[in-house]
Amino acid sequence: MLLQAMDHVADLAAAPSPAPTGVNTEGLADFLRRFFAPLFLVIVSVVALFFLFTREITRFVQFIILAIAIGVIFYVPDIIEMMARAIAGALGIQ
C-alpha cells in the first residue's frame, strides 16, 4: 500500500511532457508526392504529345530526358545524397 502511494506521488511529481507547439509536418513529403504525381504526368504527356505532333523530335527527346531527371529527383530524393557519396568515394574523398 505504501509503495503504491509512493508510485502515485512519483507519477504526480514527474513533469508532464510539453505539448507540441508547431505545425505537424509528418508525412508532408509523401502527401505532396501523391498530390502532384498525376499532375506531373499529365503535364509531361501533353507537352510530349505537342512535340511529337509538331515533329520536333530533338526537343521531344530533350524534354523527355529533362522530365525523367526531374521525376527521379522528385520521387527518389535520397538519390542525390547517394550519388554525392559515390562520387566522393570515387574521388577518394572521405
Image: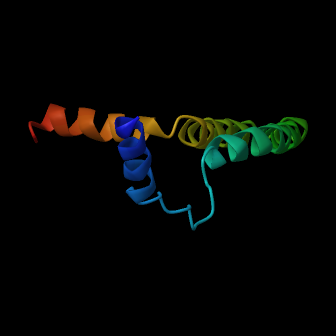
Q: Nearer the viewer, residue 39 or 53?
A: 39
- x and y, in percent, of residue 85 in the image: 25, 37
Q: Quadrant of the N terminus?
A: top left
Could you say which quadrant of the image residue 46 lies in?
top right
Farthest right residue in view: 53
Farthest bottom residue in view: 21
Q: Residue at x 91, y 37 (%)?
A: 53
Left or right of 89 in this view: 77: right
Q: Quadrant of the C terminus?
A: top left
- x and y, in percent, of residue 4 in the image: 41, 37
Could you say which quadrant of the image residue 54 lies in?
top right
Q: Residue at x 56, y 35 (%)?
A: 72
Q: Nearer the viewer, residue 12 or 89?
A: 12
- x and y, in percent, of residue 75 in the image: 60, 36
Count up the numbered dots: 0
Q: Residue at x 49, y 62 (%)?
A: 18
Visible residue check, residue 40: no
Could you say which quadrant of the image residue 15 lies in?
bottom left
The color scheme shown is rainbow
Farthest front residue in view: 1
- x and y, in percent, of residue 88 in the image: 19, 40
Q: Residue at x 30, y 41 (%)?
A: 84
Left or right of 87 in this view: 29: right
Visible residue check, residue 21: yes
Q: Nearer the viewer, residue 6 or 18?
A: 6
